[in-house]
Amino acid sequence: MSEQKQTQQMRDYVLPFQVGDHAIRGQVVCLDAVAETILSRHQFPDPLSTLVGEAAALVSMLGAALKFDGRFILQAQGDGPVSMIVADYATTNRAVRATAKITSGKEDKLAKAKGPDFLHLLGKGHLCMSIDRGPDFDLYQGITDLRGATLSEAAIQYFTQSEQIPTMIRLAVGKLSLPGEDMRWRAGGILVQFIPAEGGSRDRGEAELQKQDDKEAWARAEAFVASVAADELLDPSLPSEDLLYRLFHEDGVRVFDKTPIGFDCTCSREKIAGVLERYSDHDLKDMVEDGHIAVTCDFCREKYKFPVES
């Protein structure tokens, strides 16, 4: 199979790249079937679906950059109509999932939202990014206040404040149709960071951004990414490689192997049964309806029923 046909068929992926010989690295993400699977299962109002899709795109780019087995988790919590947005990426199977929780009693405010106004929907709160490498390692976690009108701006603020890594991010989510297909959700994004060190410990980008040519290269990269339109990130007829060439042809851009992205959930009947075992008999009795306890996974919306003996 030719490389062109493979590119056309791979519609859910992260493409890493480097700008010229500078320490400017980034990722482009395209989520097609993955975005449709996540967002169609939840059936959130469109403004919230957009935010959840953006979270899935962002966590895919950040998670795919990890060089070890683990899970990258992004979580935003606030006091607005949406109390929580959470997305995570597992490196073991290159899978992403995402969901949100609507605040009880504030559904009307969500219904009145004109668009994915990040601060309006989430209100005051915090943004948390975590790396979970399993029980043999300490959980890495960074937390900052929610700042910015968009998830992109909040994430940029996180990296500036918590990691001191110069960062620019653009995210886009929308519905579109391809020839012969129905309307479906699609998500895309591009991220660049100034990261001098490869692998292991990441040197603080701001401290290393001293040379004049580095400063100028970063200023250009930041401005070019800021100029990317939503249509450019969502258009399936525009290859990511072409978009990167448009942006960075003056400095040169090197692309690396794509990471295919899928959707998967870690829920199972056994895990949910284990959770139910922690409840008292009195609490379990209150959950019984029509002779069984029904539990729906927050992420994948899979329904599990557990019969209860009378």
Image (cartoon, rainbow, N blue to C red):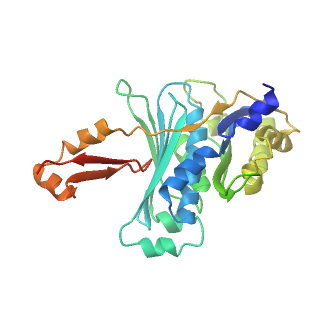
Instruction: Tell me the residue at 66%/36% (across/down).
Output: 14
Residue 169 makes an appearance in the image: no
Q: Position of residue 297 (x, y in %)?
A: 38, 48
Q: Give the total number of marks visible in the rendering.
A: 0
Asked if 118 appears above or below 306 in the picture, the reply is below
Q: Position of residue 86 (x, y in %)?
A: 46, 50
Residue 159 is drawn in which quadrant?
Answer: top right
Q: Closest to the observer: 1 or 25?
A: 1
Residue 107 is drawn in which quadrant?
Answer: bottom left
Residue 141 is drawn in which quadrant?
Answer: top left
Q: Position of residue 169 (x, y in %)?
A: 66, 48
Tell me: 215 left or right of 69.
right
Instruction: Tell me the residue at 40%/72% (across/down).
Output: 106
Asked if 77 appears above or below 203 in the picture, the reply is below
Residue 193 makes an appearance in the image: yes
Q: Closest to the observer: 88 or 93?
A: 93
